[in-house]
Amino acid sequence: MVKKGQTYGEAMQELQDVMHRIENEGLDVDVLLEEVKKAAGLIKFCKDKLQGTNVEIQKILDQIE
């Protein structure tokens, strides 16, 4: 789950931790479902953060052209 004020780096680390648990621990189906939901939320957060950063960088580059 994405925490308020979480950075991209923190989200990526949490996503890696979740993926490790999914891949290496024999999770119960209910726990697996929750971990997948958590991973999906983290992936969306990271994707949105990257897209937002790309937009901001493009604005900066447009200003200096």
Image (cartoon, rainbow, N blue to C red):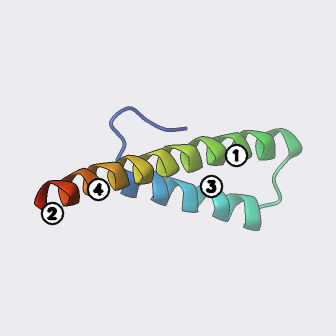
How far apart are labels 1 and 2 at the CA level? 45 Å
Q: Residues within 10 Å of mark 4 (few under 14, many from 20)?
A: few
Mark toward the start of the polypeptide (1 vs 2): 1
Give coordinates of residue 15: x percent, y percent: 56, 55
Mark 3 or 2, which is nearer the eye? 2
Residue under label 2, please give it: 65
Q: Is residue 45 left or right of residue 6?
A: right
| Kind of residue sitting beneath label 3 | Val
Give coordinates of residue 49: x percent, y percent: 41, 48
Residue under label 3, please give it: 18
Mark toward the start of the polypeptide (3 vs 2): 3
Q: Residue farthest to the left?
A: 64
| Kind of residue sitting beneath label 1 | Glu
Q: How many marks?
A: 4
| Kind of residue sitting beneath label 2 | Glu
Residue under label 1, please give it: 35
Residue in view at x 79 percent, y 41 percent = 33
Q: Are marks 3 and 4 in contact (CB under 8 Å)?
A: no
Give coordinates of residue 55: x percent, y percent: 34, 49
Give coordinates of residue 43: x percent, y percent: 58, 50
Mark toward the start of the polypeptide (1 vs 3): 3
Q: Which mark is residue 58?
A: 4
How far apart are labels 2 and 4 at the CA level? 11 Å
16 w.r.t. 14: above or below? below
